[in-house]
Amino acid sequence: MSQTRTAAPPAEESSLSTARNVLVVVALLWTVQLVALVAALSGIAQADVAIHFRTTEIAWFTLMTLLTGTFFLPFAVKAAALFGKKKVLLVATGLGFVGDLVAAVATDYRTLLIGRGIAGIYAATAPIAYAITRDIFPRRWVGLASGIMAGGVGLVAFGGPFLAGWLLDDYGFRGVLWFMAISTCVSFVLVALCVPESPVTGGGGRMDWIGGLLLGGGITAVVYAVGEGSQWGWSSGKFLAYIVGSAIALVVFLLVQRRVAEPLFPPAMTRRRPVWTVLLATSVAAGSLNAVGVVVQLLVLMPAIPTVSDGLGWSGEHNAIVSSPISAMIIVGAVGTGWLARRVDARILLGIGAACAVVGYAIGTHLHHTAGQIIEMGLIAGLGTGMVVAIAPIMIIEVVTPEEQALANGAQTLGLGVAQIIVSQLAFVVMAQHGAILKGTQFYLDQGFTNGLWLVVGCVAFGALLVPLIPRPKRLAEAEVGQAV
């Protein structure tokens, strides 16, 4: 696909005023972190949802958005390159709002999942927002803005539990669902009013529908199979059929991408060693860390029932208070990483962050029974989490051109989503091996929580081991940005 970049006006005219830059950062921060906020609220509300609807399939309450988001993401990032990033942001946000409304008014679990699935399209906003950041800000703002946007996960982690606790205590899980809808509406308004269209525009072209269907369908199939594997049986014909079908679809996708004139993810980009190694390492490490909430939120919020459930049974407010120091460390790690990225090799920051997360959650595998132990685990893991989530999008800036940014961010988000879905679903499977079903609801014993945390530790450690594969990238200060002068 041919892409052109509009000529930049003189420096004194092209640089947005500080006030304008701050306003745009706020709008994009809200857009990016709403994905994380919805995930956090969903994780905290899932125990109440499971009990209310008496379902053992509560995993799909959080995974449904990831599933549909993964399927539509390739189309969204391609459309952003063809038609404009802001336009696609508004479309994805509008569809997300529709899905949130459906979920908020749902009276049965199936309708709730349908709404959550439609809302999952909103997940495509994150990579596009990061791409716009590179396009519209002057060089000195790019690293800081990206770090702030990624570091917002700490603000979400800090305020999310307090918000969810208040909503759950006063309005039940319905209050959480309605808050999601209102927040998505606010995101739409902020993007429409505050965010300019990217100056990096597509020079014509068309959508690769076949490639998108093969990639989205193949990944969706394997994710769905992993989600249902424990029910079907891991050696059942149905499970194997989905896995084989997925593998065939992905192989055909790779062949198609070599032959079409305008591929979904250009092989010339993804074959470059700096690109594919960054995508692989960040997807495994950050995706696995995104999945840890499945274990921790169920651990602290599920009730304590002798021989049935070893949850800590905390209220939403108590959980918020205990997790606040952890959230503060995520903010410190993310903002600090955004500042250090111009001075320190990004590979070192990614490796240190992943190592801290591994140490923190390894401690928590056996020390997770009191508030003090949860804080001890979270302070170390929180610092590492903040570093990993902040450096991941910055590493993409260092290895691709501005014209490739949206597609590369989309590929990274796709990888993160796949890793998060698979690790999350495997965590449910691992925990359920030591649990019990009571009145239609799945509960978990202490060994189940321990094994779930070990699963996350192993996956993040694997991501850390992939870091040495990454060749020395161009420093952020050397990378070309949309407003560079």
Image: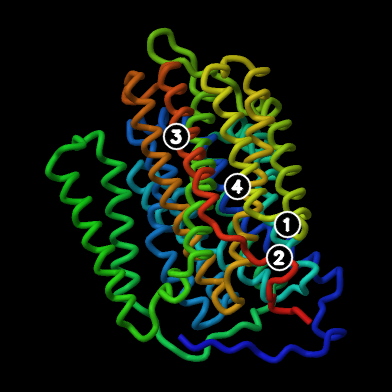
Q: Which mark is residue 49?
A: 3
Q: Which residue is mark 1?
A: 341
Q: Secondary structure at mark 1?
A: loop
Q: Position of residue 52 (x, y in %)?
A: 42, 31
Q: CA distance from mark 2 to mark 4?
A: 28 Å
Closer-to-camera residue (6/313): 6
Q: Residues within 10 Å of mark 1 (few under 14, many from 20)?
A: many
Tag 2 residue: 476
Alpha carbon separation for disc pair 1 and 2: 7 Å
Please state which amino acid type lies under the numbered disc 2: Leu
- Amino acid at circle 1: Ala
Q: Earlier in the sequence, mark 4 or mark 3?
A: 4
Q: Is residue 224 above or below residue 184?
A: above
What's the residue type where badge 4 is placed? Answer: Leu
The image position of residue 319, as x and y in percent, is 63, 26
Q: Work out whether residue 485 can be spotted.
A: yes
Closest to the observer: 264 or 474? 474
Q: Which of the marked residues, 1 or 2, is nearer the chain's N terminus?
A: 1
Q: Secondary structure at mark 4?
A: helix
Above or below, 305 relative to 21: above
Label 3 residue SS: helix
Q: Badges 1 and 2: C-beta atoms under 8 Å apart?
A: yes
- Numbered circle sitting on residue 37: 4
